[in-house]
Amino acid sequence: MLKGSTVKESQGVRGDAAASYKNAPTRTVTAGGLTFAYRDLGPRSGIPVVFLNHLAGVLDNWDPRVVDGFAAGRRVITFDNRGVGASSGSTPRTIQEMAKDAVTFIRALGFERVDLHGFSMGGMVAQVIVQDEPDLVRKLILTGTGPAGGEGIKDVTRLSNIDTVRALLTVQDPKQFLFFTRTANGRRAGKEFLARLKERTQDRDKAISLGAYRSQLKAIHRWGLERPQDLSVIHQPVLIANGESDRMVPTKNSYDLERRVPNGELVIYPDAGHGGIFQFHRQFVETAVEFLARQ
């Protein structure tokens, strides 16, 4: 554990070994003047998998089927980065600053080597971490995400605003539009996903603040305007997954990532959008667990 860091557990859900994500206690760790909220479940042995969240995502926005699927055989850590949910501080306006904060959190828990799963914005953060701290990362899973300067990433703010208005007018969750296709399969998968997010009834996280959300949008916009990075320096094995019809981070970016990293492999889910890994959670978990276990 990082010198000077402290760990606390909330009183909302009791027990050291959570049976599932819906009853995993919310803990906090303090380091670098920041207090990070996180959840920790699965076996204590082996290299942990740290989940990096999406735009506006807090602890309760991870699909419990995905977390539980990983945690059946691996230690899984989910957390709120700086200024998000129950974590302290002001949310950075660049992906690079978010990556530094994530490393501070990982080091505070005493981890010297981790696997990373970054979804959407979290996948952008993961790309920076693996380049800045290559010895910290063993394997990388990038889902629903894209590289710096990737096609359409600068348009995330516009799409998010449009679909938020659509959701308000139809009394739905914006993720129904942003994460899933408008086909029958996509609509059904979206409703099932949103229902799973409500399974946890105690010790729920704080929703993201409007200020933090706006800062994240600025960070993503800047990422979309950046010059392309040299991804050939990423020598870790990389699993890339997405739906075939991602509107938020166009699926072309997933193909681009797979082409540019030396040890990448790509999975594309049919009739699925940005939240393809949640629509096809069983298949994704099976693929990801096998990927992480592979020598």
Image: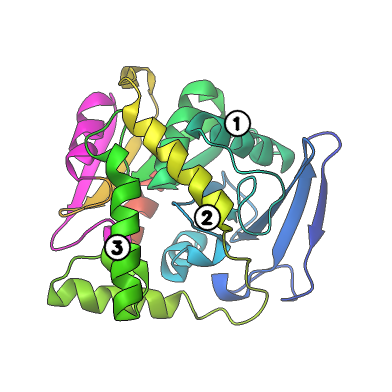
At x 29%, y 73%, the residue is 190
Label 2 or label 1, whichever lies nearer to me, is 1
Quarter where residue 21 is shown? bottom right
Q: Determine if residue 145 is in view.
A: yes
> Which residue does the numbered mark 2 point to in the structure image?
74
**Is the C-beta separation of discs 2 and 1 under 8 Å?**
no
Q: Real-space Cα distance between discs 3 and 2? A: 35 Å
- The front one of 4 and 44 is 4
Q: Determine if residue 144 is in view.
A: no
Q: How many marks?
A: 3
Q: Real-space Cα distance between discs 3 and 1? A: 31 Å
The image's mark for residue 100 is 1
Instruction: Return the x and y of residue 170 as percentages of the image width and height.
Output: 29, 79
Q: Secondary structure at mark 2?
A: loop
Residue 18 in the image: above or below residue 272 = below
Residue 192 in the image: above or below residue 130 = below
Instruction: Return the x and y of residue 7 as percentages of the image width and height.
Output: 80, 52
Q: Real-space Cα distance between discs 2 and 1? A: 24 Å
At x 18%, y 51%, the residue is 268
Range of residues picked out in magenta = 250-279
Label 3 or label 2, whichever lies nearer to me, is 3
Q: Secondary structure at mark 3?
A: helix
- The front one of 120 and 231 is 120
Please give left or right for residue 66 compared with residue 71 in the image.
Answer: left
At x 42%, y 44%, the residue is 121
Q: Amino acid at mark 1?
A: Lys
> Which residue does the numbered mark 3 point to in the structure image?
163
Magenta stretch encompasses residue 224: no
Magenta stretch encompasses residue 276: yes
Q: Amino acid at mark 2?
A: Arg
- The front one of 281 and 91 is 91
At x 16%, y 74%, the residue is 185
